[in-house]
Amino acid sequence: MFDYLVFIGRFQPFHLGHLAVIQTALAQSQQVILLIGSAEQPRSTRNTFKFHERETMVLSAFEQADAARIRCVPLVDILYNDVRWVKSVEDAVHSVTGDNQALKIGLVGHYKDRTSYYLSLFPRWETVFVDSYQGISATPIRDAYLLGEMPTEARVPATTIDLLAAFKQTADYQALQEEARYIVDYKESWSHTPYPPTFMTVDAVLVHSGHILLIERGHIPGKGLFALPGGFLDPDETLFNACLRELREETNLGLDDATLRAAYRSQRTFDEPHRCERGRAITQGFYFELDGSTPLPEVLGGDDAKHAFWLPLAEVRSDQLFEDHYAIIDELVLNNL
């Protein structure tokens, strides 16, 4: 018997495969710690449900005695730094277990695909592998649900169905359904290419005296979310020039090329496979740091940006930002402060 078995997942939504893993964990441990990922992401077609909604999905599927042995803990996304992510997992577990080194702690899960490599990142914890339950996956369940199709009890617990039915009546669901239909149409427009397309984009991370330049997206996907100024690469331009063009188009920033080139500090590729729901998109993030002795430059939203603004870095929150833009800011700026 383990004292604690740890199950890491996103549970978007909670289905019978998740249920089977937790039942195995309950049979082999005193308590189960569920680390619920993407806990601070805004709603999207990939992250449809908030942490507390997924916690309710999980606990409502069990009898009271078993539910009392399950601890749900939020886990934030750290997409581009495994060392920091491992520490966040360990910190989340220790928030339940304390620092008692005598406890027997293990991981429980099944090898789904290449994304399951994380199971090897905790050599101090024994891993309990569980077979996939009838090949059930949350992604097709969620995709169909957002297009109007309710899952059946052959795939999700009855309690999950009740919660999904209630959420379907909300304005949040209607907004996500509109976005899901947009994404289906977008992918259909590229369906006749000989190979699935890979898009190249650029994002400008422009900092001035403790503030970062952001836009509010004016259209789906991500309407109303904050984002870095950026967009798609044109065929006849370099990545750097594309970044300067998109920066000006979306913010009407009046600084000349010489000033921006002098402010350039670094760049990095961001390629998490699921970072963009419209398809495979790899972005190049360019970090600029302007002279803090000058006033904040005036900006005005343009192109598909509802408006542009300077936000204090201390107020940047992951639940407000589009796709992986918080992770980009975190890697290029916040992690180095």
Image (cartoon, grey):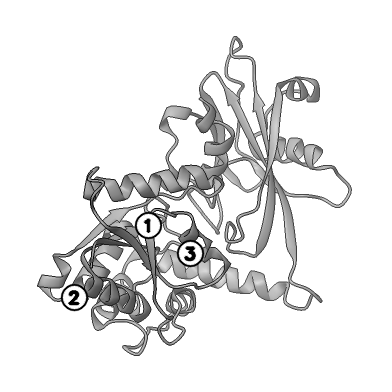
Up-down relation of residue 323 to residue 289 (above or below)? below
In the displayed structure, does residue 226 sit left or right of residue 97?
Answer: right
Q: Quadrant of the N terminus?
A: bottom left
Q: Is residue 111 visible?
A: yes
Residue with the mark numbered 1: 125
What is the distance, in whole Å, between disc 2 and disc 3 at their CAs?
25 Å
Q: Is residue 226 visible?
A: no
Q: Earlier in the sequence, mark 3 or mark 1?
A: 3
Res. 114 mark = none
Residue with the mark numbered 2: 62
What is the distance, in whole Å, between disc 3 and disc 1 at their CAs?
29 Å
The residue mark sitting in front, 2 or 3, is 2
Q: Position of residue 208 (x, y in %)?
A: 58, 21
Specify the amino acid type for callout 2: Phe
The residue mark sitting in front, 1 or 2, is 1
Q: Earlier in the sequence, mark 2 or mark 3?
A: 3
Q: Are marks 3 and 1 in contact (CB under 8 Å)?
A: no
The outermost residue toward the right is 236
Q: Residue at x 70, y 36 (%)?
A: 267
Q: Nearer the viewer, residue 329 or 218?
A: 329
Q: Position of residue 236 (x, y in %)?
A: 89, 48
Residue with the mark numbered 3: 46
Q: Residues within 10 Å of mark 2 (few under 14, many from 20)?
A: some
Q: Residue at x 44, y 74 (%)?
A: 138
Q: Position of residue 249 (x, y in %)?
A: 70, 39
The outermost residue toward the left is 65
What is the distance, in whole Å, between disc 1 and disc 2 at their CAs?
26 Å
* Rendered image quadrant of residue 275: bottom right
Q: Nearer the viewer, residue 162 or 328?
A: 328
Q: Nearer the viewer, residue 276 or 58?
A: 58
